[in-house]
Image (spheres, grey):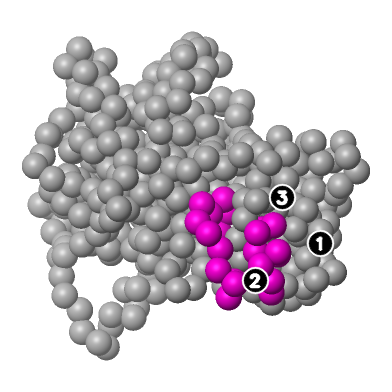
Amino acid sequence: MKAIRKFISGDDAVAEAVRLASPDFIAAYPITPQTVVVERLSEMVEDGSLVSEFMHVESEHSALSACMGASAMGVRTFTATSSQGLLYMAECLPYASGGRFPIVMMNGNRSVALPWSIYGDHRDSLSQLDSGWIQIYVEDAQESLDMTIQAFAIAENAEVLTPVMINLDGFLLTHTYELVEIPEKDIVGSWLAPVDNPYAMNFDNPRNMGFSSQPSDNTEFKYQQHKAVEDSRKIILETEKSFEQIFGRSYGGLAAGFMCDDAEFIIITLGSVTGTCRTVVRELRKEGIKAGLIKIRFMRPFPTDEIIGLTTNAKAIAVLDRDISFGYEGTVFTNVNSALARTHNDILKMNYIAGLGGRDIPKESIREIFKELEEGLTTRPDKAVKFLNLNVETDEKYSDSEDNSTQHHREGVLLWS
């Protein structure tokens, strides 16, 4: 395969992928840390390297609304957003999925106000898991490019016809520069099939779109949406296999395991922190500790079978969540815990809340998580949710003794609930 290598950011990688996919329509509204994507696309349209209708709209709500209108005509569409912008789109997200519009959208993961923050966590996208979109989370800039291309193939497949959201950790991926392999446009064009939406507007075969339903038939419409996302599992795997045959890269399906075959202690991640965790797992293996890693790549459809299979020999697992459902636990942990409850009730399961508002997650803290998993097999803590590196004085009610509280604070881990 012919390709060039460029030293570019995650935002640039997404823009390059969109150029290669040749969408007919792009709706753009800037918001940090996504802005670079639509800036680059506007430059490409201006210099002629991308032939597309580029619409600079007045809001994120309008961006997705415009994409729905274009998609209804049966053309390839793209937009991008982040954080409060994604939440401003919230009204339109279920419209897009319910209308079966195969839109592809990049989201630059960023914390949700208040307090106001431009830095990244996963609270924006995970809050929209029930909107009916397929959700992808990537680890680096190369995966960002490759999955943006694949997202068009997945969304536009006749068995799916569901919008796809590609999530990049704000600044950690969007603004970090890496060497990225960019394939030739002609090769991508020959691999990516043209849009063929059988439900697109057609004056010769008119259809009713955007209609209301009665209680007697609404469930059937929702079931069809659910089935499409479930059926996308097969399409995702087929798309990745086909992509690998042409472009030589594969990422492990809906969830990828690392050293999990005999792993007794496994950490489960989402996004860019995976690389740091993989480094720690390698180090621990050299020290004789049977550590492993599961990288969740798709939150919808959720990789239930993959997680069950990868944790067969595990004694304890930790879910590293850059999200918190206030008053309960991390959203990723809720999904993982539900999957494991089907077969692995005996596994110790711990939830670590970390990286909120862009806070660093150092190797030392990840090593401490593995240490606590090993210790937890003996102590069997009855409280599963912990905030990592919490920078406040601990209170006696959160621990059995003041000494224990101080020790937990020093190690960067605080028992929370």
Q: Write down the region rendered in magenta.
A: 387-408
Residue at mark 3 to residue at mark 1: CA–CA distance: 10 Å
Report the amino acid beneath label 2.
Ser
Check disc 3 and report its element: helix, strand or loop: helix
The N terminus sits in image quarter:
top right
Q: Is residue 170 above or below residue 390?
A: above
Q: Are marks 3 and 2 in contact (CB under 8 Å)?
A: no
> Percent position (x, y) of residue 366?
67, 46
Report the amino acid beneath label 3.
Glu
Q: Residue at x 85, y 49 (%)?
A: 290
Q: Residue at x 45, y 25 (%)?
A: 176
Q: Is residue 124 above or below residue 329?
A: above
> Percent position (x, y) of residue 295?
62, 47
Q: Is residue 392 magenta?
A: yes
Report the amino acid beneath label 1.
Glu
Residue 24: name its quadrant: top left
Instruction: Please tell me whether mark 3 or mark 2 is closer to you in this view.
Output: 2
Residue at which label 3 appears = 368
Point out the tag, 3 or 1, that comes first from the N-terminus.
3
Nearest the viewer among 150 and 397 is: 397
Nearest the viewer among 158 and 275 is: 275
Q: Is residue 316 left or right of residue 248?
A: right
Point out the tag, 3 or 2, that comes first from the N-terminus.
3
Residue at which label 2 appears = 399
Q: Is residue 401 magenta?
A: yes
